[in-house]
């Protein structure tokens, strides 16, 4: 679940600008080499990017200049648990995406010209298909096809030196700093503490 709204002064982005920025966000957030194909396909279903033109935009110095990089405010909405664990990472990815647009346009963005807000929605206030849901419900939706492949034994094995997160299917390095858990003698790797905790809850394991 990635709901991304990008606000900018009316008339300052054209369709190509929106395509460059939107594609950059998708490339960064949905990198195909980081997750299994099943999970990436579900994540694409749950990712929505929209642009909002705002009229009468003013700063403390008045109307933004018509030259150079227009100011941008990005709001990313995710489950609260994701915000608490990955807010810094999300901001970094969005900042990189805006930088790609600026580089493509030859814009020198001034400091204070980009603001990013990561909103976390509490459990029960997330409306997956319009029904009250939790972060675990959203994760279950994203990984339903991956888990089905696991149960059927058709899930792709982890590449050498890597582990596949059993919750979300993300491919993580098997080394120092990796979030791991041993279960019945099997070393499991996780992309985040949230996936590790979700696995422990599912299997009734203490953390």
Image (cartoon, grey):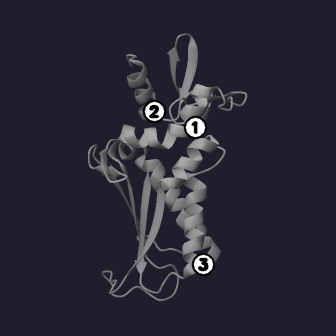
- SS for dot 2: helix
Position above or below: 189 against 61 = above
- SS for dot 1: loop
Residue 18: x and y in percent read 54, 74
Q: Is residue 119 left or right of residue 36?
A: left
Q: What separation in Å lies between label 2 and label 1 (alpha carbons)?
A: 10 Å
Q: Residue at x 50, y 59 (%)?
A: 94
Count of residue discs: 3
Q: Nearer the viewer, residue 147 or 94?
A: 147
Q: Nearer the viewer, residue 115 or 79?
A: 79
Residue 133: x and y in percent read 32, 44
Q: Residue at x 55, y 27 (%)?
A: 189
> Which residue in the structure is indicated by mark 2?
195
Position above or below: 117 against 8 = above
Residue 24: x and y in percent read 59, 63
Q: Is residue 107 visible?
A: no
For disc 2, the neighbor class at 10 Å (few under 14, some 14 to 19, many from 20) is: some
Residue 62's image quarter?
Answer: bottom left
Badge 2 vs badge 1, beta-carbon distance below 8 Å: yes
Residue 130: x and y in percent read 32, 54
């Amino acid at each position: 679940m990635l709901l991304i709204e990008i606000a900018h002064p009316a008339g300052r982005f054209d369709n190509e600008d929106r395509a460059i920025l939107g594609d950059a966000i998708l490339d960064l957030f949905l990198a195909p080499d980081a997750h299994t194909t099943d999970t990436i396909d579900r994540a694409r279903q749950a990712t929505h990017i929209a642009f909002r033109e705002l009229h009468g935009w003013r700063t403390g110095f008045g109307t933004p200049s018509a030259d150079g990089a227009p100011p941008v405010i990005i709001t990313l909405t995710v489950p609260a648990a994701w915000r608490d664990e990955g807010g810094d990472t999300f901001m970094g990815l969005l900042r990189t995406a805006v930088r790609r647009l600026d580089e493509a346009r030859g814009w020198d963005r001034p400091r204070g010209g980009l603001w990013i807000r990561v909103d976390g929605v509490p459990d029960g206030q997330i409306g997956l298909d319009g029904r009250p849901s939790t972060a675990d419900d959203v994760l279950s939706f994203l990984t339903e096809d991956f888990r089905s492949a696991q149960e059927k034994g058709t899930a792709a094995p982890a590449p050498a030196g890597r582990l596949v997160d059993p919750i979300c299917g993300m491919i993580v390095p098997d080394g120092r700093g990796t979030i791991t858990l041993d279960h019945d003698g099997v070393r499991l790797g996780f992309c985040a503490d949230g996936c590790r905790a979700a696995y422990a809850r599912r299997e009734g394991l203490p953390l």
